[in-house]
Image: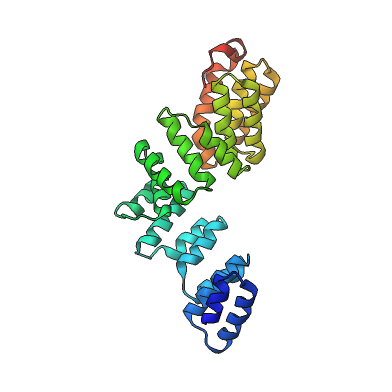
Amino acid sequence: MEEVVRAYQEGNLNYALRKINEIIKSNPSPDIYNLLGKILLELGKDEEALEAFRQANNRLEVARIYIQKGLYQDALNEIKDETNDESKILRALIYIKMENFDKAKEEIANINSNSPLFHKVKGIVEYHTANYYGALRSITIALREYPMDAELYYYRALVKAELGLEYEDDIDMAINLNPYYAELYFSKGVILEQRGKLNEAVNYYSKAIKYKPELVKAYYRRAKVYMKLGMDQEAEKDIEKVKELTLVGSEMCIRDRDKSLHYISKHYRTLFHIQASFQG
């Protein structure tokens, strides 16, 4: 076993895998399967790692793999009855992914931890519950340990925007770290639009739509910018897309629908005559 651990720590993963499989044949144990799961994960063999962690009865690692795959309900089911702080923090993260921020807040209510994941979860929850100064502190603490986490830079930008602070650097950093994150392009578009850089704003809204075609608010804002630019036909197409997407019935679409359709129904007839009156 010591030989396997040493090989694993030195990054000699294929050798470690071969040796640990030999041990499992004669002397399987939860610890052996747990190490096997770690080796398999680092070799990119997620499904095999999942089975190894199941053999080790390591529900936390099983849940983590499900989270990475976007299987949030499966992840929640794995650790729903666990009572330790680590499980509560992970459940809070799952609830964040499911956009149930009240439940996430409940999970971490009585936890006092220094783990960067805890501070990340706490910061995101604080943002969604309008505790912006608390969110700024928690997210910044998490960034010390997770300096390559695009999501953290994105949320810190959102917090700074609420506090009236400069946030463009955080958006740019997040885009560099994750160039496929549609919301980042949307946020950058808002910044540019507010500065009067309308053509650049259109480009960023278009990038947001490219990576997330169902992002209603991007079509909505792009339509407003098109109107300011006198591009009435393009604006009409985006407005029709907003109407179309609001019929899908997703939670996000429902959230955007009232604002978007109210705006359209109230102003549609005069939109092209009052372009200058639009605000960001």
Using the rendered view, name the quadrant where residue 21 is placed.
bottom right
Q: Residue furthest bottom?
A: 26
Q: Residue furthest left?
A: 110
Instruction: Identify which residue, 260 or 280, lies in the foreground.
Output: 280
Q: Position of residue 101 (x, y in %)?
A: 41, 46
Q: Residue at x 50, y 74 (%)?
A: 34
Confirm whether residue 241 shows in the render: no
Q: Residue furthest right?
A: 233
Q: Position of residue 276 (x, y in %)?
A: 57, 12
Q: Residue at x 63, y 80 (%)?
A: 18
Asked if residue 20 is positioned above or below residue 175 in the image, the reply reads: below
Asked if residue 52 is positioned above or below residue 224 in the image, the reply reads: below
Q: Residue at x 58, y 33 (%)?
A: 186
Number of callouts: 0
Confirm whether residue 38 shows in the render: yes
Q: Is residue 250 left or right of residue 237?
A: left
Q: Position of residue 35 (x, y in %)?
A: 52, 74
Q: Give the color scheme: rainbow, by chain, secondary structure or one colour.
A: rainbow
Asked if residue 168 is positioned above or below residue 31 in the image, the reply reads: above
Instruction: Identify which residue, 54 or 178, lies in the foreground.
Output: 178
Using the rendered view, name the quadrant where residue 220 is placed.
top right
Q: Position of residue 55 (x, y in %)?
A: 51, 76
Q: Residue at x 40, y 46 (%)?
A: 141
